[in-house]
Amino acid sequence: MTRAGRLAKSPFEIYTLAHVSRRGGQAAATLRELAHGLETCSDQSIYHHTIVAMKNNPVLSEEPSNDFARWAQSSLKRENLAAHLAMADIKDCQTIARSAGRAL
């Protein structure tokens, strides 16, 4: 086989995605602490605990779909709150940015 026969007709591209987590040192044991944490944490942290967690959670899983819902269920034993937090619909979400100092 000649070298010309081994060349691709068009170049190919490889796409990959990696999510790297880092600990920010924040933790919450109460709803008040969670609210304070949401006010002070980075948008990247909120993205990680909602969007990334939802993408990593199987659709038919019994587990809540995001880390905040999972926390409400396991730490607070608040099933109704966990269900509410798990209903977040990300398909129309275009930004995580806060407005007027209000957390999501």
Image: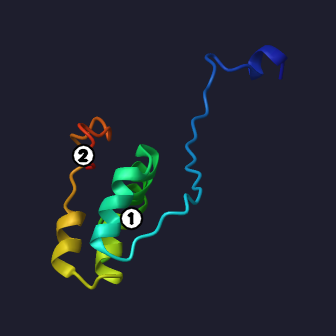
Q: Residue at x 59, y 56 (%)?
A: 22
Which quarter of the picture shows residue 9?
top right
User: Where does the N terminus fall, quadrant-wise?
Assistant: top right
Q: Amino acid at mark 1?
A: Asn
User: Which residue is the site of mark 1?
Assistant: 57
Q: Are marks 2 and 1 in contact (CB under 8 Å)?
A: no
Q: Position of residue 46 (x, y in %)?
A: 39, 52
Could one spot residue 53 in this view of the protein? yes
Which quarter of the picture shows residue 70?
bottom left
Q: Residue at x 38, y 66 (%)?
A: 67
Residue pushed farthest bottom? 77
Badge number at residue 27: none
Badge number at residue 102: 2
Instruction: Using residue 13 as the reference point, say whether residue 62 is left or right of it.
Output: left
Q: Position of residue 95 (x, y in %)?
A: 30, 36
Q: Residue at x 44, y 46 (%)?
A: 42
Q: Residue at x 75, y 18 (%)?
A: 5
Instruction: Using residue 104 as the reference point, say whether residue 13 is left or right of it.
Output: right
Q: Amino acid at mark 2?
A: Arg
Total numbered badges shown on the rendered structure: 2
Dot 2 falls on a residue whose secondary structure is loop
Looking at the image, which is closer to me, 90 or 32? 32
Binning the other alpha carbons within 10 Å of mark 2 as few (below 14), some (14 to 19) or many (20 upward) gives: few
Residue pushed farthest right? 2
Q: CA distance from mark 2 to mark 1?
A: 28 Å
Which quarter of the picture shows residue 4?
top right
